[in-house]
Image (tube, coloured by chain):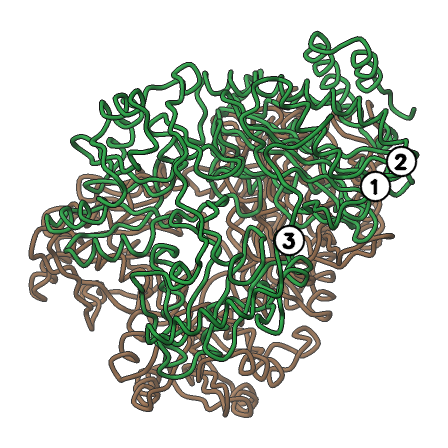
Chain colours: A green, B brown
């Protein structure tokens, strides 16, 4: 009945392949006169989701997590992973071949400084690292008396016999009714913002926004891998594989830019370098290869932040209307799922995987689902205490009684969603009720926040933590990340986190997702997406902002202790649920409507 | 009856002197083959309070504010001041000689880049700027095709005929019962923290802490101007003018360090440079002169943060006990003042200056007052809307009916205080009542805050603003600054501000002073000092911290609207006032006790 099109639950890792592949790599390195090699989990754009042909680290070491780093030396090798992935790495990787090193304790560069032999030549693929990353490794190599060597051909590609082809997902034009601003106007705004002669666009999300295009090169995010050069004056150049373009998209893009394949970019940069031009390179995504060849050609590099990031973050009226429509559609699917879950889970046979498949199916039944926006976190009891838990056939359990946490999202043409609900199966313990209510108090504090223009997410983050802090509790992730418009579900620079120094501006979409995790027992997270909006307040002396909550999905009342809520918090929850009921009810059948009515009933203090 | 020993209310500025002195300076510059000169309001330690002989900017331009910058070129000159000082600068300075430039709009370096002629030689006194400041001006000069030239003799000193002598305040040993840790132990801790071969101590506050000494070289802060070299291994060197030392202090300091006059420091640095030593220079206070001569001698400069800053910020048990005693004594003086004020002000003849003199007198009557910790802000009505208002004979007004704000502090041997109270004379308007209550809510939110170890002041700052934000209001200064222990009333690195990235640690003393300012009408600020303390919370999973409020002074109940306070806020206020009453009452006479009883009465919600 239910199935999953956009997510698998199979871990393909085979620890026994690591040692022979490492041996092959070492032989290859020897032939290249190298004593070691850096293997990041990265593509040439520092993307979060990478194409299968870029999964070099997974091929070599067996580790399939979304973040990791391998350093292979002639006599030893190490895999660096963060706290999320310690257990997974231990299961997937042959630790006699690759020492498992916690990233929080030793940075790869520091490990290299300590372990590289004097005189060693350490290779790296300059397409897969930014200049900043290379500089850190160069400093580390220098400490060891070793040197860093950029290679023209990645040695893993040479030995990876069944390496998948480069992706060639079809490029689609993003419809004007959803984009809300023409690419011509966007490109003019970008050009006008430049102090340099031109901008190298190396972030495919920025490329997608500026040219109103979407692609299908990686999972979960509709980007097309490619580059652009946007000059302060003159016609932009767009570097995309011709095979990704239809006649229609080609014609449309040619009106905006001179089209070339990505292979033409190095020569284009050399030409600009020879003309002594000054180019802005995005520090976070531009590959070291391009920065250095431009410098060598005589160009002046300005390393900074691609201005498109902030432009893209501020959604326009059409994008916000799209977000509301997407969230209504997603809320309907979520409500149908939650109604089904409440009926099914108590029977005790429902598994984490089956629940994830059901949820995707409900979303697909809208007929509008393009992809899920990230692999669903479907986590029962102690699994919910792992904020980034990803269910596999091996980890899958029956949900049974206790907490169930589901964090999921969708890609629709008009918007990207991301929602987490924590659900009760059976009766809830006092500790769980209390913790969930404290998390909800933090969530409501963000939802209700009012703040002057210029306020950053760093200034608001603690509002979400205060109720937990008063109980001696906390959570170890930010309160919210930025979200794109039919783009990445993790978008910068906007965020609600102690690291979020960027001022929040009207139109920015962010998540509001405080949580609480009790290791080995349960986990809680309550997540809605919100959009920054202006607020008219009587007597206000400043321009004030607040959040419009976009997500319309019931919050589980069975996990709330009303006595712990202040009157204004109860008022917020009741108003939210009234809005959810009014929005979703017309799209549900009679059974679902009855369920929704109960799920969104008014609560009173102390009852 | 009342008078002031530690503060004057006379503005010595005479705008007519600016033009002729600027002319003299230009003649001198011409003789030195310079086309311009930088005149910061700074001494060689970047102190907040400087000795009279360092008031070059005031002598030249007439401006006596505590922050400012002059650039004098051959054909034009500019005085840069921040928003606090716009009005004062306009009154004190001949604007035909010095263009008045708001610092917020144009930084001095940018102005120089725009206004220096090509080929111009711009002089600066390398003792009065840090290396970082010099680098910024060098970059600016380069843009203009000009160059920056360090001079050996400051041209203003050459033309300032009646320049005061260098200060030679007596150095006293800070008693062990107040310091709480021997200088031997402190110096060993500093040495052990170093990665460099030695630390150059250039901040006199750090010097005072590390050697357990106090001085009398500048107003309001008991520091001795001097330097030290603390090596990782071996005996420290202390550079102080011998004339400041008594036989006793000399003998004691000689047990800790090799004593030399400050004039011996350059040669000492050259010796270490010649030995290729690596020295840590404090980025915020080390004069460019010393950094560059050490580099030229062959030394390796490590620019960073003097580790003493953080050690000094964490007060030990003796310092915290001293702070409590100082605050009790200060609270008695404040209560006596407030009682007297309530009797005197309504008669309508009391002036801002007379009130400030009375307050200082009550403090002096303790017999323990060493100095006031900064010039008292004694501000009636619209003057209170200027957060840094300083009353002069010219600005002085009768206090009359309306708001009166008094921000003051004291230096006692056992601690430094800083307290602001906003008082009602006559009946208060609804707007004033509401605004004062919102400020109090912010104050209480900080006072009651509980937060995990590792939390910075930046994360807490918005707690103080939230009630104002909800009404569309805000204030344009940080919520709190660090405070020293019989040292500077403005101490880093701890602070409660969006810029306060340092984690708060037990023992740190900070101010808690949200405010609200309605231009031309009134100003509000409620300030107590707090000390960070550990908190035991039942069921806590993290090490939790909170604040102990040190200040014991009634908060004016006539300006509070209880309806706007939550039950826990009323509980805090009542508990605070009960504590204030119990602490102060035994030290007051019958009249004052009666006043205190009323001023600290319990309030109830809605009454």
Q: Earlier in the sequence, mark 2 or mark 1?
A: 2
Q: Tell me, yes or no, if residue B198 can be seen here.
A: yes
Determine the residue positioned at 50% across, 25% down.
Answer: A542
Do tags 2 and 1 sit on the same chain?
A: yes
**Residue B442 place in picture, x, y as percent:** 66, 37
Label 1: how many Cα within 10 Å (few below 14, some 14–19, many 20+): some
Determine which of the numbered discs, if any, sits on residue B335 in the image.
Answer: none
Residue placed most toward the observer, B49 or A4? A4
On screen, residue B560 versus residue A428, left or right, reads left
B479 sits to left or right of B340: left
What residue is pinned by disc 3? B455
Badge 3 sits on which subunit? B
Residue shown at the point (32%, 19%) measured from the top left: A182
Give the residue displayed 58% in from the left and 60% down from the top.
A81
Nearest to viewer (mark 3 / mark 2): 2
Tell me the residue that label 1 is attached to: A398
Q: Residue B368 appears in which quarter of the rendering?
A: bottom right
């Amino acid at each position: 009945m239910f199935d999953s099109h956009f997510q698998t639950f199979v871990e393909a890792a085979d620890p026994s392949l690591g040692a022979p592949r490492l041996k092959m790599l070492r032989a290859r390195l020897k032939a290249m006169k190298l004593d070691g090699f850096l293997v990041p989990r990265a593509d040439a754009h520092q993307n979060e989701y990478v194409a299968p042909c870029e999964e070099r680290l997974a091929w070599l070491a067996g580790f399939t997590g979304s973040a990791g780093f391998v350093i292979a030396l002639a006599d030893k090798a190490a895999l660096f992973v963060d706290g999320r992935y310690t257990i997974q790495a231990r299961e997937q990787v042959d630790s006699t071949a690759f020492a498992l090193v916690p990233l929080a304790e030793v940075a790869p560069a520091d490990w290299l400084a300590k372990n590289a032999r004097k005189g060693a030549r350490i290779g790296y693929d300059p397409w897969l690292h930014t200049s900043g990353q290379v500089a850190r490794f160069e400093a580390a190599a220098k400490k060891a008396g070793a040197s860093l060597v950029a290679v023209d051909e990645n040695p893993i590609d040479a030995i990876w016999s069944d390496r998948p082809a480069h992706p060639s997902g079809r490029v689609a034009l993003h419809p004007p009714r959803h984009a809300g601003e023409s690419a011509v106007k966007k490109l003019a705004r970008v050009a006008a913002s430049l102090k340099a002669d031109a901008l190298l666009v190396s972030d495919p999300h920025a490329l997608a926004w500026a040219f109103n295009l979407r692609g299908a090169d990686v999972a979960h995010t509709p980007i097309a891998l490619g580059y652009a050069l946007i000059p302060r004056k003159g016609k932009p150049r767009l570097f995309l594989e011709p095979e990704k373009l239809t006649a229609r998209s080609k014609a449309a893009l040619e009106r905006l830019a001179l089209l070339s394949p990505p292979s033409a970019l190095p020569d284009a940069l050399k030409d600009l370098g020879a003309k002594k031009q000054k180019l802005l390179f995005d520090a976070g995504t531009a590959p070291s290869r391009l920065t250095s060849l431009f410098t060598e050609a005589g160009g002046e590099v300005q390393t900074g932040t691609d201005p498109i990031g902030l432009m893209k973050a501020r959604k326009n009226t059409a994008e916000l209307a799209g977000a509301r429509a997407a969230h209504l559609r997603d809320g309907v699917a979520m409500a149908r799922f939650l109604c089904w879950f409440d009926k099914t889970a108590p029977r005790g046979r429902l598994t984490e995987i089956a629940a994830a498949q059901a949820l995707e199916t409900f979303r697909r039944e809208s007929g509008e689902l393009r992809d899920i926006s990230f692999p669903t976190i479907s986590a029962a009891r102690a699994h919910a205490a792992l904020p980034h838990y990803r269910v596999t056939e091996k980890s899958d359990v029956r949900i049974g009684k206790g907490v169930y946490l589901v964090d999921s999202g969708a890609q629709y043409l008009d918007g990207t969603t991301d929602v987490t609900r924590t659900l009760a199966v059976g009766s809830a313990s006092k500790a769980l009720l209390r913790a969930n209510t404290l998390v909800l108090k933090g969530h409501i504090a963000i939802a209700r926040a009012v703040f002057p223009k210029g306020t950053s997410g760093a200034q608001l983050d603690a509002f979400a933590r205060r109720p937990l802090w008063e109980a001696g509790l906390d959570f170890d992730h930010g309160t919210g990340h930025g979200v794109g418009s039919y783009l990445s579900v993790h978008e910068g620079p906007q965020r609600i986190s102690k690291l979020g120094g960027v001022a929040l501006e009207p139109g920015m979409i962010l998540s509001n997702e405080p949580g609480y995790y009790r290791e080995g027992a349960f986990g809680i997270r309550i997540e809605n997406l919100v959009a920054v909006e202006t607020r008219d307040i009587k007597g206000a002396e400043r321009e004030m902002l607040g959040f419009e909550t976009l997500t319309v999905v019931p919050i589980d009342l069975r996990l709330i202790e009303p006595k712990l809520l202040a009157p204004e918090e109860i008022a917020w929850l009741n108003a939210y649920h009234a809005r959810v009921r009014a929005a979703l009810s017309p799209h549900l059948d009679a059974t679902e409507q009855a369920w929704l009515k109960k799920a969104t009933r008014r609560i009173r203090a102390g009852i």
